[in-house]
Amino acid sequence: MTMLSEEKVFKDPVHSYVYVQEKLIWDLINSAEFQRLRRIRQLGTTFLTFHGAEHSRFSHSLGVYEITRRIISQFERHNYPDWPKEERIVALCAALLHDIGHAPFSHSIEEIFETDHEEWTVKILLEQSEINSILSDYSRDLPQKVADVIRKTYSQTIVVSLISSQLDADRMDYLLRDAYFTGTDYGNFDLERILRVLRPYQGTIVVKESGMHAIEHYLMSRYQMYWQVYFHPVTRSSEIILRQIFKRAQQLYRENYTFKWMDESIYSLIEGTLNLRSYLSLDEALVQYAFSRWQHESDALLAELCERFLNRKLYKYISVKTISEDWLQEIKNTFISIGLNPEYHMEIDYPMDRPYDIYRMEQPMIDGKEKAPIMLLEKDGSLSEIASKSDIIASISGLHQGNYHLYYPEEALIRHRYQLSAKMKQIFNISE
C-alpha cells in the first residue's frame, strides 16, 4: 500500500479532523465523481425548513470514512482476532464511496423516476469512470469488492456491517452531522463511548455489554431526529412539491409538450434513458436552474410548481387520524370546482412511508434485505439482542406514530372561500 509522504487533514465541524494517510484514499477524494458530491445536499429539501442544512454528501462521506477508519484502527490496535486486517482498504473505500451514486434531491427523484442510488454507485464503481480507474490501478478486483460491499453481498460480512447495519458508520455520522447543521440537539450522542465498546465478533460488529446505555442514547437520538427533523411536515411539503414538478414534467413529456428550455441530462432523466455520463452531470445546481427556467413555461401548472419551490411558497397541511374514501372524494370534488387539480394540488402523506427505521429487532441479513439487530457481547462470550436487555430500546423498537397529513395550497382555498361549503371551511379552518 502506497502511503502519502505527508498525512492530509480535513478540518471537520463534527469530528474535528479527518485523517488521510493512504494515497489511494486521497486519489479517490480528488476524483471527479467524488467531488460531484459537493454539489448535492445531504438532506435534500430540509434547508427550506432548517436554513443551516446546506451540508453536502461530500462532507458526510468524509465523516463516514473517518468513523470507519477510527473503528478499524481500534480493532487493529487491540489486535482483535475476529477483524480480518487484509480488509482494511476495502472497508475504507466502501465507507468513502458509499454515497457516490446519489442524485440531486436523491430520495425524491428516486421515488418519481424509480432509480436506485446504490445501483448507480455500483455502476460508477464498475463502469468507465475515474473512480473505477483509480481502484483498478490499485488492484484489479478492488472495484468489484467495493461494489459487493455496497450491494451487501460481500463475503466478509463484517465489512458490510461497518458500512450498513443498525449501528454503522453511515448512521453515526449523519445523525451527528445533521444535528449540527440543523442547529438541533436531538441527534447528539456519545460517539467516543460507542467506538470504545464496539467489538468484531464472528463476522459482524457487536457491542460490549457495558456499552448498552451508550447505544440507548444513540437510538433515542435517532428516534428524536426522525420525528423532529427527517419527518418534519414542512420538509415533507417541500419534498411533495419537488416530486410534483418532476411528475408534471414527465407527464408533459409523454404528451409531446415542447419545453422552452430543456437540458440533455434532465431530458434523459425524464425519458428514462440515463447513461452514466448524463447521470453524473446531474447536480442540484442544474436542477434548480431548470426550475428557474421552467417558471416561464407556457404550462401554467409546471410554472406554478417551480415558482412555489424556488420561493418557498409551500403547501399547508391539516392533520387527521383516519381518512375515508368518501371524505377524500368530497375534498377532490371541491378542489375541482374551484379550479384546482387534485392530482397536483393535494397529497396525503404519512410519516412512516419513508426509508427510515428507528430500530427493528430483525433476523440477520438475508440477501441484504434486512439489517441484523444490535447484539450485546456478554462477559461469558454469549450474545443477546439489545432490546431484550433494554426496556428503553424495546419501547421504541418498530414504533410507528403520527397522523396523516393532507397538503394543499391554502391561499387558493382562502381566495375561493365563498365557494366552499361550511364543512370544507371547517375541515381547512377557513373563516369568512
Image (cartoon, grey):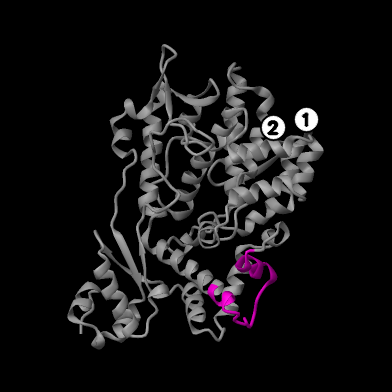
Residue 356 on image: x %, y %: 43, 47
Any part of residue 31 in sight:
yes
Q: Which residues are magenta?
A: 251-272
Any part of residue 100 in sight:
no
Which residue, as the protein is rendered here, is positioned at the far left? 422
Q: Quadrant of the N terminus?
A: top right
Task: Tell me the element at label 2.
Answer: helix
Amino acid on which the number 2 mark rests in the picture: Ile
Q: Between residue 15 and residue 112, name the one nearer to us.
A: 112
Residue 54 disc label: none
Amino acid on which the number 1 mark rests in the picture: Met
Residue 368 on image: x %, y %: 53, 37
CB under 8 Å between discs 2 and 1: yes
Of the numbered discs 2 and 1, the one sitting upstream in the chain is 1
- Name the residue carrying label 2: 89
Residue 255: quadrant of the picture: bottom right
- Vertical comparison of 218 with 113: above or below: above
Give the distance between the C-alpha atoms of the residues marked 2 and 1, in whole angstroms: 9 Å
Q: Quadrant of the C terminus?
A: bottom left
- Vertical comparison of 156 with 399: above or below: above
- Name the residue carrying label 1: 1
Residue 413 on image: x %, y %: 31, 81
Q: Is residue 253 located in the magenta-colored stretch of the structure? A: yes
State left or right for residue 430 relative to residue 205. left
